[in-house]
Image (spheres, rainbow, N blue to C red):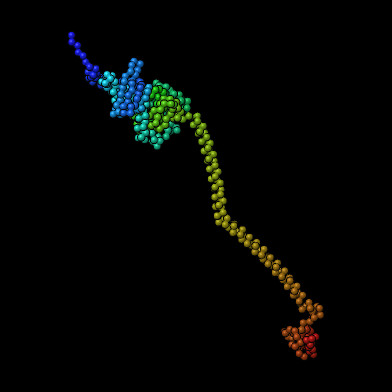
Amino acid sequence: MNKSIYSVAQINKYIKNMFAQDFVLNHVSIKGEVSNCKYHSSGHIYFTLKDEGGVLKCVMFRQDRGGLSFSMKEGDKVIVSGRMDVYERSGEYQLYAKEIELDGAGNLFLKFEALKRELAEMGMFAPEYKQPIPKYASTIGIVTAQTGAAIQDIRNVASRRNPSVQLILYPAQVQGEGAAETIVQGIRALETYGVDVIIVGRGGGSIEDLWAFNEEIVARAIFDCRTPIVSAVGHEVDWTIADYVADMRAPTPSAAAELCVFDRNNFMQDLAKSRMHMNTVMNNKIRHVRLRLENDAKHIELLSPQHKLRELQQRLDNISDKITYVMKHRLDACRNRLQLIIRSLESNSPLRKMESGFAYVQIGQKRLISVDEIHQKDEISITLRDGEVLAEVKEVKKYHESY
């Protein structure tokens, strides 16, 4: 019996051809944990995939590294897509990777970060696009699961804070395939209905459970909605794309209800305080206006003709009093001066002189003051204290100057 004998290279090549002809092995995706990861200086990446059942050698060539969007490290759970082939030199088969993505939550996180960066660059998170949440909403729309804990929490808070606020629920699917589409339908339906504000959310969960709120169609529906939207997805530590796009983010559905449902008791207290403040302001305003009117009335009275007449009358009285005072002062001064003149006249009066033995001599109407003015036989008139004497001059004697 003849038997065929082959070289090692022939067998390795044969096996390589078998791998090449297998369609499944040429387009395969394998998941596992990364170990022995090495970034070679050539640009190639060498690593091993392992799970509880075995290990598999892998390589990603430098020209294929565009299929790797993160820095791979030991312990990463990944899904590697590529082709199985045989390395003829060593006779080992290995996976030649074309794409590598994180498995499960890690991959979703990368998608989350990529969409977050894209929407941020488009300006969908910008503060200038945020709408204010109405302070006194009367109708609140809610997009969440009909039977979830979120709607019960919102109802409990609303009944405690203000039972008169109307809650309108759009029962949406918040998890799984098709959830994002029903959330978008709910937002648009409540916007058309005309509610004052919309709460979009659900209770907590894993990133996979919350993924519907990270879908781009949900983000765009929130951004395009003309009604203010409060995002309330998961717990306080959970963040979704919806939280960044919404007009306001609440850490929980209960917190969203606290933000949207105004407290009736606080409102009534604030109303009473506002009423008191308004009354105080109005009273102060009335008092101010009344004082202003009184001042204006006084000002008008000051400008009135009657007041002017009274003012002129008082001025006239003052002038009259001043004239009277001046005239009296002048009369008193004249009277005193007259008394002085009288005394002076009396002291210099011829009658006073006559009483002392002097006489007043004149010729006709001419008063004589010198013997040169009188001649012998002139008729003279001599006025005495108690009468007048007519006489004729018999002799004129003139005193010498030395006498």
Question: Viewed as shown, does residue 125 lie left or right of 1?
Answer: right
> Quick check: 204 left or right of 278?
left
The x, y position of residue 216, in whole percent, is 34, 29
Q: Among all residues in the image, which is located at the extreme top?
A: 1
Foreground pick, 97 / 145: 97
43 horizontally vs 327: left or right: left
Residue at the (39%, 31%) spot, across then down: 244
Q: Is residue 165 visible?
A: no
Answer whether residue 70 is visible to the viewer in this image. Answer: yes
- At x 29% / y 21%, what residue is drawn? 95
Task: Please give the name of the residue rendered at 80% of the width and 85% of the height, measured from the top-left corner.
Answer: 403
Q: For the point 73% across and 85% down, which residue is it?
A: 364
Pick the front one: 244 or 112:
112
Of the pair 9 and 210, the residue shown nearer to us: 9
Residue 392 percent coordinates (x, y): 78, 88
Quadrant of the rendering where the N terminus is positioned: top left
How many tags in the picture? 0
Q: Is residue 396 above or below residue 308?
A: below
